[in-house]
Amino acid sequence: MIYNPTKIHFGEQAARQAADDLASLGSRAFIVTGRQSAVQSGALDSVLEVLREKGISWQIHARIGENPSLEMVLEGAQALNASECDFVIGIGGGSPIDAAKAIALASANDLAEDELYRTDLFKRSLPLAAVPTTSGTGTEVTQYSVLTDRSRKRKAGFGSSLAFPALAICDPRHTLSMGARETLNTGIDALSHLLEGIYSQKREALLYPLIYSGIKAIIRNLEKALAQPGDLAARSEMMRAALYGGLAISSTSTTLQHSLGYPLTSHFGVPHGLSNGIAMRQVMELYSRALRPELDELFHALGMGRQDFYAWLDGLGMKAELDITEEFIAMAVPEVMGSRNMANNPFAVSAEEVAGLYRSLA
Protein backbone atom coordinates (compact mmCIF):
# COMPACT_ATOMS: atom_id res chain seq x y z
CA MET A 1 0.00 0.00 0.00
CA ILE A 2 1.18 3.51 -0.77
CA TYR A 3 -0.13 6.45 1.24
CA ASN A 4 1.36 9.89 1.76
CA PRO A 5 -0.71 13.00 2.61
CA THR A 6 2.15 15.54 2.65
CA LYS A 7 1.95 18.37 0.13
CA ILE A 8 5.41 18.98 -1.34
CA HIS A 9 6.97 22.18 -2.69
CA PHE A 10 10.39 21.48 -4.22
CA GLY A 11 12.94 23.78 -5.80
CA GLU A 12 14.52 27.19 -5.45
CA GLN A 13 12.20 29.65 -3.68
CA ALA A 14 10.12 26.74 -2.36
CA ALA A 15 9.03 28.74 0.69
CA ARG A 16 7.62 31.47 -1.52
CA GLN A 17 5.85 28.89 -3.66
CA ALA A 18 4.34 27.43 -0.49
CA ALA A 19 3.24 30.77 1.00
CA ASP A 20 -0.51 30.24 0.70
CA ASP A 21 -0.29 26.66 1.96
CA LEU A 22 1.85 27.78 4.90
CA ALA A 23 -0.62 30.53 5.77
CA SER A 24 -3.47 28.03 5.72
CA LEU A 25 -1.96 26.10 8.64
CA GLY A 26 -2.66 28.75 11.28
CA SER A 27 -2.11 32.27 12.57
CA ARG A 28 0.87 31.85 14.93
CA ALA A 29 3.79 29.52 14.23
CA PHE A 30 5.92 27.65 16.76
CA ILE A 31 9.25 27.23 14.96
CA VAL A 32 11.37 24.28 16.11
CA THR A 33 15.04 24.41 15.07
CA GLY A 34 18.53 23.43 16.08
CA ARG A 35 20.89 25.99 17.46
CA GLN A 36 22.60 27.01 14.20
CA SER A 37 21.61 25.18 11.01
CA ALA A 38 18.32 26.98 10.37
CA VAL A 39 20.11 30.33 10.44
CA GLN A 40 23.30 29.31 8.64
CA SER A 41 21.39 27.62 5.83
CA GLY A 42 19.16 30.63 5.19
CA ALA A 43 16.05 28.50 5.70
CA LEU A 44 14.85 30.45 8.73
CA ASP A 45 15.08 33.75 6.87
CA SER A 46 13.18 32.26 3.90
CA VAL A 47 10.35 31.12 6.17
CA LEU A 48 10.21 34.31 8.25
CA GLU A 49 10.00 36.43 5.10
CA VAL A 50 6.87 34.53 4.06
CA LEU A 51 5.36 34.68 7.55
CA ARG A 52 5.83 38.45 7.67
CA GLU A 53 4.19 38.92 4.29
CA LYS A 54 1.24 36.76 5.38
CA GLY A 55 0.83 38.53 8.71
CA ILE A 56 1.63 35.40 10.72
CA SER A 57 3.36 35.82 14.08
CA TRP A 58 5.80 33.28 15.45
CA GLN A 59 7.86 32.05 18.36
CA ILE A 60 11.24 30.37 17.83
CA HIS A 61 12.31 27.35 19.88
CA ALA A 62 15.97 26.85 18.92
CA ARG A 63 16.86 24.20 21.48
CA ILE A 64 17.04 20.92 19.57
CA GLY A 65 20.36 19.07 19.53
CA GLU A 66 21.54 16.07 17.56
CA ASN A 67 19.65 12.86 18.36
CA PRO A 68 16.79 14.67 20.16
CA SER A 69 15.98 13.29 23.58
CA LEU A 70 12.67 12.71 25.28
CA GLU A 71 13.54 15.59 27.61
CA MET A 72 13.99 17.95 24.65
CA VAL A 73 10.59 16.96 23.34
CA LEU A 74 8.84 17.58 26.65
CA GLU A 75 10.61 20.92 27.08
CA GLY A 76 9.44 21.89 23.60
CA ALA A 77 5.87 20.76 24.29
CA GLN A 78 5.75 22.86 27.44
CA ALA A 79 7.01 25.90 25.54
CA LEU A 80 4.44 25.26 22.80
CA ASN A 81 1.63 24.98 25.34
CA ALA A 82 2.60 28.37 26.78
CA SER A 83 3.04 30.05 23.40
CA GLU A 84 -0.54 30.29 22.08
CA CYS A 85 0.78 29.00 18.74
CA ASP A 86 -1.62 26.98 16.61
CA PHE A 87 0.79 25.27 14.19
CA VAL A 88 4.39 24.07 14.11
CA ILE A 89 7.25 24.54 11.65
CA GLY A 90 10.27 22.26 11.91
CA ILE A 91 13.43 23.61 10.26
CA GLY A 92 16.68 21.68 10.02
CA GLY A 93 17.94 18.16 9.56
CA GLY A 94 16.25 15.05 10.82
CA SER A 95 16.69 15.96 14.48
CA PRO A 96 14.71 19.25 14.57
CA ILE A 97 11.99 17.94 12.25
CA ASP A 98 11.60 14.66 14.17
CA ALA A 99 11.50 16.66 17.38
CA ALA A 100 8.89 19.03 15.90
CA LYS A 101 6.66 16.05 15.09
CA ALA A 102 6.96 14.71 18.63
CA ILE A 103 6.48 18.16 20.19
CA ALA A 104 3.27 18.72 18.20
CA LEU A 105 1.94 15.33 19.30
CA ALA A 106 3.04 15.67 22.93
CA SER A 107 1.41 19.08 23.19
CA ALA A 108 -1.85 18.14 21.48
CA ASN A 109 -2.26 14.93 23.52
CA ASP A 110 -0.76 16.10 26.83
CA LEU A 111 1.76 13.26 26.85
CA ALA A 112 4.18 12.46 29.66
CA GLU A 113 7.74 11.25 29.01
CA ASP A 114 6.83 7.57 29.35
CA GLU A 115 3.99 8.04 26.85
CA LEU A 116 5.96 9.46 23.91
CA TYR A 117 6.18 6.05 22.20
CA ARG A 118 2.53 5.18 23.03
CA THR A 119 0.99 5.73 19.61
CA ASP A 120 -2.34 4.40 20.91
CA LEU A 121 -2.56 7.62 22.93
CA PHE A 122 -2.11 9.84 19.85
CA LYS A 123 -5.56 11.23 19.07
CA ARG A 124 -4.70 14.54 17.42
CA SER A 125 -1.80 16.78 16.46
CA LEU A 126 -1.12 20.34 15.43
CA PRO A 127 -0.53 21.11 11.74
CA LEU A 128 3.15 20.83 10.86
CA ALA A 129 5.33 22.19 8.07
CA ALA A 130 8.77 20.63 7.54
CA VAL A 131 11.68 22.57 6.03
CA PRO A 132 14.75 20.32 5.57
CA THR A 133 18.26 21.75 5.51
CA THR A 134 19.96 18.40 4.84
CA SER A 135 19.54 15.71 2.20
CA GLY A 136 19.21 12.56 4.23
CA THR A 137 16.34 11.56 6.45
CA GLY A 138 13.37 12.31 4.19
CA THR A 139 11.50 12.97 7.44
CA GLU A 140 9.72 15.88 5.73
CA VAL A 141 7.45 13.30 4.08
CA THR A 142 7.31 10.47 6.64
CA GLN A 143 5.20 9.58 9.66
CA TYR A 144 8.25 8.65 11.76
CA SER A 145 10.09 10.36 14.59
CA VAL A 146 13.29 8.93 16.07
CA LEU A 147 14.09 9.94 19.64
CA THR A 148 16.75 9.11 22.21
CA ASP A 149 15.98 7.86 25.71
CA ARG A 150 19.16 8.99 27.46
CA SER A 151 18.39 7.27 30.75
CA ARG A 152 18.35 3.91 28.95
CA LYS A 153 20.96 4.86 26.30
CA ARG A 154 18.41 3.77 23.73
CA LYS A 155 17.46 5.28 20.38
CA ALA A 156 14.11 4.28 18.92
CA GLY A 157 11.34 5.67 16.77
CA PHE A 158 7.60 5.68 16.49
CA GLY A 159 5.32 5.90 13.50
CA SER A 160 1.88 7.46 13.37
CA SER A 161 -0.23 8.82 10.53
CA LEU A 162 -0.74 11.90 12.73
CA ALA A 163 2.99 12.64 12.46
CA PHE A 164 2.96 13.23 8.70
CA PRO A 165 3.80 16.87 7.99
CA ALA A 166 0.99 18.68 6.24
CA LEU A 167 3.55 20.51 4.14
CA ALA A 168 7.15 19.89 3.02
CA ILE A 169 9.18 22.87 1.80
CA CYS A 170 12.32 21.58 0.06
CA ASP A 171 14.73 24.21 -1.26
CA PRO A 172 18.13 22.76 -2.28
CA ARG A 173 19.77 26.13 -1.57
CA HIS A 174 19.26 25.43 2.11
CA THR A 175 21.69 22.50 1.89
CA LEU A 176 24.61 24.50 0.48
CA SER A 177 25.97 25.26 3.97
CA MET A 178 26.48 21.59 4.87
CA GLY A 179 30.05 20.54 5.51
CA ALA A 180 31.65 17.49 3.92
CA ARG A 181 31.04 15.15 6.83
CA GLU A 182 27.36 16.05 7.09
CA THR A 183 26.97 15.81 3.31
CA LEU A 184 28.42 12.30 3.33
CA ASN A 185 26.50 11.06 6.36
CA THR A 186 23.13 12.38 5.24
CA GLY A 187 23.69 11.14 1.70
CA ILE A 188 24.34 7.63 3.02
CA ASP A 189 21.22 7.87 5.17
CA ALA A 190 19.17 8.66 2.05
CA LEU A 191 20.82 5.73 0.26
CA SER A 192 19.87 3.46 3.17
CA HIS A 193 16.23 4.48 2.91
CA LEU A 194 16.14 3.84 -0.82
CA LEU A 195 17.72 0.40 -0.47
CA GLU A 196 15.43 -0.48 2.41
CA GLY A 197 12.48 0.32 0.18
CA ILE A 198 13.59 -2.77 -1.72
CA TYR A 199 14.67 -4.84 1.29
CA SER A 200 11.45 -4.44 3.28
CA GLN A 201 8.88 -7.18 3.14
CA LYS A 202 6.40 -4.33 2.61
CA ARG A 203 8.24 -3.31 -0.58
CA GLU A 204 6.03 -1.99 -3.35
CA ALA A 205 7.09 -2.30 -6.98
CA LEU A 206 5.25 0.93 -7.83
CA LEU A 207 7.96 2.73 -5.86
CA TYR A 208 10.86 1.11 -7.69
CA PRO A 209 11.19 3.81 -10.38
CA LEU A 210 11.59 6.44 -7.62
CA ILE A 211 14.01 4.21 -5.72
CA TYR A 212 16.18 3.47 -8.76
CA SER A 213 16.21 7.13 -9.74
CA GLY A 214 17.15 8.20 -6.21
CA ILE A 215 20.00 5.69 -5.88
CA LYS A 216 21.33 6.65 -9.31
CA ALA A 217 21.21 10.34 -8.31
CA ILE A 218 23.26 9.66 -5.18
CA ILE A 219 25.88 7.61 -7.02
CA ARG A 220 26.23 10.36 -9.62
CA ASN A 221 26.12 13.38 -7.33
CA LEU A 222 27.34 12.60 -3.81
CA GLU A 223 31.01 12.89 -4.72
CA LYS A 224 30.28 16.06 -6.71
CA ALA A 225 28.62 17.62 -3.67
CA LEU A 226 31.60 16.61 -1.53
CA ALA A 227 34.16 18.01 -3.95
CA GLN A 228 32.21 21.16 -4.90
CA PRO A 229 29.93 22.12 -1.98
CA GLY A 230 28.44 25.03 -3.95
CA ASP A 231 27.29 22.87 -6.87
CA LEU A 232 23.57 23.61 -6.68
CA ALA A 233 22.70 21.08 -9.39
CA ALA A 234 24.36 18.29 -7.39
CA ARG A 235 22.71 19.52 -4.18
CA SER A 236 19.33 19.52 -5.92
CA GLU A 237 19.79 15.93 -7.02
CA MET A 238 20.82 14.88 -3.52
CA MET A 239 17.76 16.56 -2.00
CA ARG A 240 15.53 14.89 -4.57
CA ALA A 241 17.07 11.51 -3.73
CA ALA A 242 16.48 12.08 -0.02
CA LEU A 243 12.88 13.04 -0.72
CA TYR A 244 12.40 9.86 -2.75
CA GLY A 245 13.90 7.87 0.11
CA GLY A 246 11.42 9.40 2.53
CA LEU A 247 8.52 8.65 0.19
CA ALA A 248 9.74 5.04 -0.07
CA ILE A 249 10.04 4.33 3.65
CA SER A 250 6.79 6.12 4.45
CA SER A 251 5.20 3.06 2.82
CA THR A 252 7.79 0.33 3.45
CA SER A 253 9.43 1.42 6.72
CA THR A 254 13.05 0.55 7.48
CA THR A 255 14.74 -2.75 8.33
CA LEU A 256 17.74 -4.35 10.02
CA GLN A 257 19.93 -1.74 8.30
CA HIS A 258 18.57 0.89 10.69
CA SER A 259 18.20 -1.40 13.69
CA LEU A 260 21.94 -2.18 13.58
CA GLY A 261 22.79 1.50 13.49
CA TYR A 262 20.84 2.69 16.52
CA PRO A 263 23.18 1.12 19.14
CA LEU A 264 26.21 2.43 17.24
CA THR A 265 24.77 5.93 17.59
CA SER A 266 23.60 5.70 21.20
CA HIS A 267 26.75 3.98 22.53
CA PHE A 268 29.57 5.30 20.33
CA GLY A 269 28.13 8.59 19.10
CA VAL A 270 28.33 7.54 15.45
CA PRO A 271 26.22 9.93 13.31
CA HIS A 272 22.99 8.29 12.20
CA GLY A 273 23.67 8.13 8.47
CA LEU A 274 27.19 6.82 8.96
CA SER A 275 25.89 4.17 11.36
CA ASN A 276 23.69 2.90 8.53
CA GLY A 277 26.51 2.95 6.01
CA ILE A 278 29.13 1.12 8.03
CA ALA A 279 27.38 -2.23 7.59
CA MET A 280 25.64 -1.50 4.28
CA ARG A 281 27.65 -4.06 2.34
CA GLN A 282 27.20 -6.77 4.98
CA VAL A 283 23.43 -6.24 5.14
CA MET A 284 23.11 -6.40 1.36
CA GLU A 285 25.08 -9.65 1.31
CA LEU A 286 22.89 -11.10 4.07
CA TYR A 287 19.68 -10.17 2.26
CA SER A 288 20.91 -11.30 -1.15
CA ARG A 289 20.02 -14.91 -0.44
CA ALA A 290 16.35 -13.92 -0.42
CA LEU A 291 16.38 -10.90 -2.72
CA ARG A 292 18.63 -11.91 -5.60
CA PRO A 293 16.02 -11.10 -8.31
CA GLU A 294 15.28 -7.72 -6.76
CA LEU A 295 18.97 -6.87 -6.44
CA ASP A 296 19.71 -8.07 -9.96
CA GLU A 297 16.93 -5.81 -11.24
CA LEU A 298 18.29 -2.89 -9.20
CA PHE A 299 21.82 -3.18 -10.52
CA HIS A 300 20.56 -3.67 -14.06
CA ALA A 301 18.66 -0.39 -13.68
CA LEU A 302 21.79 1.28 -12.29
CA GLY A 303 23.94 -0.06 -15.12
CA MET A 304 26.54 -1.46 -12.73
CA GLY A 305 27.39 -4.67 -10.92
CA ARG A 306 27.14 -5.28 -7.21
CA GLN A 307 30.92 -5.37 -6.85
CA ASP A 308 31.12 -2.01 -8.64
CA PHE A 309 28.66 -0.65 -6.09
CA TYR A 310 30.75 -1.99 -3.22
CA ALA A 311 33.86 -0.40 -4.74
CA TRP A 312 32.01 2.94 -4.92
CA LEU A 313 31.02 2.60 -1.26
CA ASP A 314 34.60 1.81 -0.27
CA GLY A 315 35.76 4.90 -2.15
CA LEU A 316 33.64 7.15 0.06
CA GLY A 317 35.93 6.42 3.01
CA MET A 318 33.24 5.85 5.64
CA LYS A 319 35.02 5.35 8.97
CA ALA A 320 34.09 5.45 12.65
CA GLU A 321 35.84 4.71 15.93
CA LEU A 322 34.13 1.57 17.22
CA ASP A 323 34.97 -0.58 20.21
CA ILE A 324 33.02 -3.69 19.24
CA THR A 325 33.53 -5.96 22.23
CA GLU A 326 31.62 -9.05 23.20
CA GLU A 327 30.14 -6.99 26.03
CA PHE A 328 28.80 -4.45 23.51
CA ILE A 329 27.41 -7.25 21.33
CA ALA A 330 25.68 -8.86 24.31
CA MET A 331 24.03 -5.53 25.08
CA ALA A 332 23.24 -4.45 21.50
CA VAL A 333 21.83 -7.68 20.04
CA PRO A 334 18.70 -7.75 22.27
CA GLU A 335 18.12 -4.07 21.45
CA VAL A 336 18.32 -4.83 17.73
CA MET A 337 16.12 -7.91 18.00
CA GLY A 338 13.48 -5.89 19.86
CA SER A 339 13.43 -3.07 17.32
CA ARG A 340 10.18 -2.62 15.43
CA ASN A 341 12.17 -2.40 12.17
CA MET A 342 13.01 -6.11 12.43
CA ALA A 343 9.43 -7.02 11.53
CA ASN A 344 10.12 -5.63 8.04
CA ASN A 345 13.09 -7.85 7.17
CA PRO A 346 12.63 -10.05 4.09
CA PHE A 347 13.21 -13.10 6.31
CA ALA A 348 13.68 -13.74 10.02
CA VAL A 349 17.16 -12.59 11.01
CA SER A 350 18.57 -14.45 14.03
CA ALA A 351 20.39 -13.04 17.03
CA GLU A 352 23.45 -15.01 15.93
CA GLU A 353 23.39 -13.32 12.52
CA VAL A 354 23.11 -9.89 14.16
CA ALA A 355 26.07 -10.70 16.42
CA GLY A 356 28.04 -11.82 13.37
CA LEU A 357 27.32 -8.56 11.57
CA TYR A 358 28.63 -6.58 14.55
CA ARG A 359 31.75 -8.74 14.78
CA SER A 360 32.45 -8.00 11.12
CA LEU A 361 32.79 -4.33 12.05
CA ALA A 362 35.44 -4.91 14.71
Image (tube, rainbow, N blue to C red):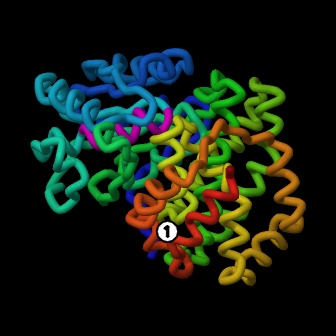
The overriding secondary structure of the stretch rendered in magenta is helix
- What range of the chain is rendered magenta? 93-103
Which quadrant holds the N terminus?
A: bottom left
Query: Is the residue 125 above or below the residue 202 in the image?
Result: above
The amino acid pointed to by label 1 is: Thr
| Left-right relation of 156 to 103 | right
Q: Is residue 25 visible?
A: no
Q: Which residue is mark 1?
A: 252
Q: Is residue 111 visible?
A: yes
Q: Quadrant of residue 238?
A: top right
Q: Quadrant of residue 167?
A: top left
Judging from the image, what secondary structure is the residue with disc 1 in? helix
Residue 240: x and y in percent read 64, 47
Name the residue: 30% across, 21% down. Answer: 61
**How many numbered marks are there?**
1
Q: Quadrant of residue 186?
A: top right
Residue 100 falls inside the magenta stretch:
yes
Camera-side residue: 65 or 33? 65
